[in-house]
Image (cartoon, rainbow, N blue to C red):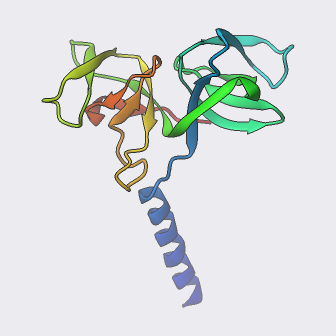
Amino acid sequence: MKPFIIIILLILFTVTCVICQEPAYHYGKLIDNMDSVDVHKEQNDSSDIVAQVKRKEYFLLLSGKDGWSHIITMSNITGYIRENSVNVKGTACGIASIDTGDDDMHTYIYMDVSVLSSAIETVTDGDYVIVLDNSDGDGCDDTNIVLTKSGIKGYIDEKYVRPISIK
């Protein structure tokens, strides 16, 4: 009987954790006095440069260690930048790509949750967005508040949002 109860408790704990997903990441941009920074493959200045992040571009912060931040750019490139160049802006649930699944190849980000509100940005198939916490108490269960590379924050129909698996 004990093993059965333990199994049930483990299942309940697992289901509860999946349902109550809390934001696991942060997002940020470069500090104001920097124009750009190289994204390195490894945590050292002499490693290969895999991308560059420019001023006012947002990125997802995965972790930080030994003065380096592990990030994912809005081009879905993973690498490292110096921790002292990062301005953390808030919590995030992850990164996602846009997939409209139709011939239009674009959709809109709105000011409010209603599609009757004003469109503030157009996103196209293949664009990446940072998925933000819904702020309504259910953590990352909803994927309809997003942040674009340029920092536009708004609402999108979640049927267009395809979360990217983070390794």
Q: Position of residue 52 (x, y in %)?
A: 65, 11
Query: Given the current orientation, which residue lies at the most extreme front position?
Result: 33
Left or right: 13 as drawn, with respect to 82 = left
Quadrant showing the C terminus: top right
Quadrant in which residue 3 is drawn: bottom right
The x and y percentages for residue 16 are 45, 65
Residue at left 47%, top 19%?
A: 149
Seen in the image, is 113 located left or right of residue 5?
Answer: left
| Residue 6 in picture, x, y percent from top left | 57, 80
Can residue 41 be seen from the camera position used here?
yes
Direction bottom: furthest residue: 1
Left or right of 40: which side holds 167?
left
Vertical placement of residue 166 versus 50, above or below: below
Which is more toward the observer, 159 or 145? 145
Q: In the image, what residue occupies the spot 81% across and 25% down?
A: 43
Residue 101 visible: no
Residue drawn at the location 65% of the way across and 21% of the way down: 31
Q: Is residue 85 above or below residue 46?
A: below
Q: Residue 123 falls in which quadrant of the image? A: top left
- Which residue reaches farthest left? 116
Residue in the image at 62% along x and 18% along y? 32
Instruction: From the top left corner, tell me how far across and down residue 141 is, in percent.
Output: 38, 49
Quadrant of the frame with the N terminus: bottom right
The image quadrant that residue 73 belongs to is top right
In this rendering, the answer to whether 131 lies above or below 38 is: below
| Number of on-image labels | 0
